[in-house]
Amino acid sequence: MNRTEIILATAVILFAAFALGWIANWVVTRFTHVTKDDMSDLEQMAHQLHEAEETRDKAITYAENRERDLSNLLTQKDAELTAAMEGLREARAEAADLRAYVERINQAD
């Protein structure tokens, strides 16, 4: 091989490498190119996701408030039940005392 053939072979190899690089770049760009339709779909999905997150946050807040209200109500009802049971216990004790008193009076007669 003489000098001219080496230069020509190098030029062909470099041109082929350039062409392959350009074709590869075109293919990658073609497949990764985002169209306006794709962008509008992405924006719509992002908007729907944002709305879903807001709805979820509102539901969580509502559930927490409802749970707090129900816990307070349960605490109040428990306190009322305790007071009623204590009153019932005192009434039973008083009734027992009155029965004993009436029996003593009846026996004394």
Image (cartoon, grey):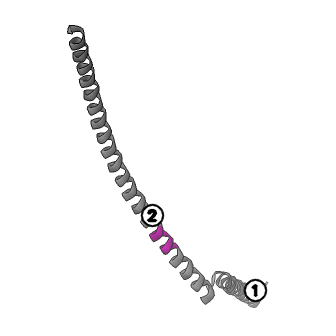
Residue at 30% over, 46% down = 76
Q: Which residues are magenta?
A: 49-55
Between 100 and 36, the residue placed more toward the observer is 100
Q: Is residue 67 above or below residue 14?
A: above
- Give the residue type that dot 2 points to: Ala
Q: Secondary structure at mark 1?
A: helix
Q: CA distance from mark 2 to mark 1?
A: 72 Å
**Label at residue 59:** 2
Q: Earlier in the sequence, mark 2 or mark 1?
A: 1
Label 1: few (<14), some (14–19) or many (≥20) C-alpha neighbours in 10 Å = few
Q: Position of residue 17 (x, y in %)?
A: 70, 83
Q: Quadrant of residue 5?
A: bottom right
Q: Position of residue 103 (x, y in %)?
A: 26, 13
Residue at 27% over, 20% down = 96
- Image quadrant for the N terminus? bottom right
Q: Which residue is mark 1?
A: 9
Left or right of 52? Residue 61 is: left
Q: Is residue 12 above or below residue 46?
A: below
